Image (spheres, rainbow, N blue to C red):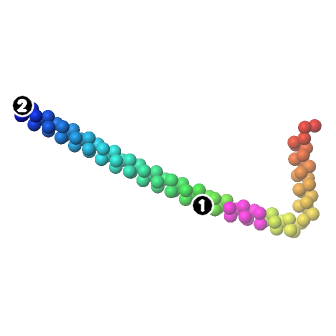
Amino acid sequence: MNWNTNRTSEYADRAGESVQSFADDAKRTAADMRNRMSDAMAKSADWASKKTDDLNTTSRELVGSMSDAVTARPLLAVGIAVFAGFLISKLFSRD
């Protein structure tokens, strides 16, 4: 009986070690996945930030160039605005 008890105890110890090893591996894998996701999210945030800055710069340049064009030819700018308003009203009128 003592021999069976010892063998059962050995099997239980081995099973416990296997479960602990599996749990440790799972924790390491989960931590690795979190780190990879964090890296990917950081790269995505950096990319989005750069693109936002680029868009902001481009829009400021466009507004600046339009402002210069309107300053150079104000009557032409007013005429274009009136014509664009007329076209838009015709597009959206129900008649």
- Report the amino acid beneath label 1: Lys
Q: Find residue 9 and report its image quarter.
A: top left
- From the top left corner, tell me how far across and down residue 10 is, in percent: 14, 38
- From the top left corner, tell me how far across and down residue 44 is, in percent: 54, 54
Q: CA distance from mark 1 to mark 2?
A: 73 Å
**Residue farthest along the left direction in this orientation:** 2
Which residue is found at the position 34% from the left and 45% from the top? 26
Q: Number of labelled discs?
A: 2
Secondary structure mostly seen in magenta is helix
Residue range in magenta is 56-64
Q: Would residue 44 be found to the left or right of residue 84 on screen?
A: left
- From the top left corner, tell me how far across and down residue 57 is, in percent: 68, 64
Specify the label residue 50 is tagged with: 1
Element carrying mark 2 = loop
Q: Which residue is mark 2?
A: 1
Residue 23 part of the magenta segment: no
Depth check: 12 or 53 in front?
A: 12
Residue 57 part of the magenta segment: yes
Depth check: 73 or 49 in front?
A: 49
* N-term-proximal mark, 1 vs 2: 2
Which residue is found at the position 81% from the left and 66% from the top? 67
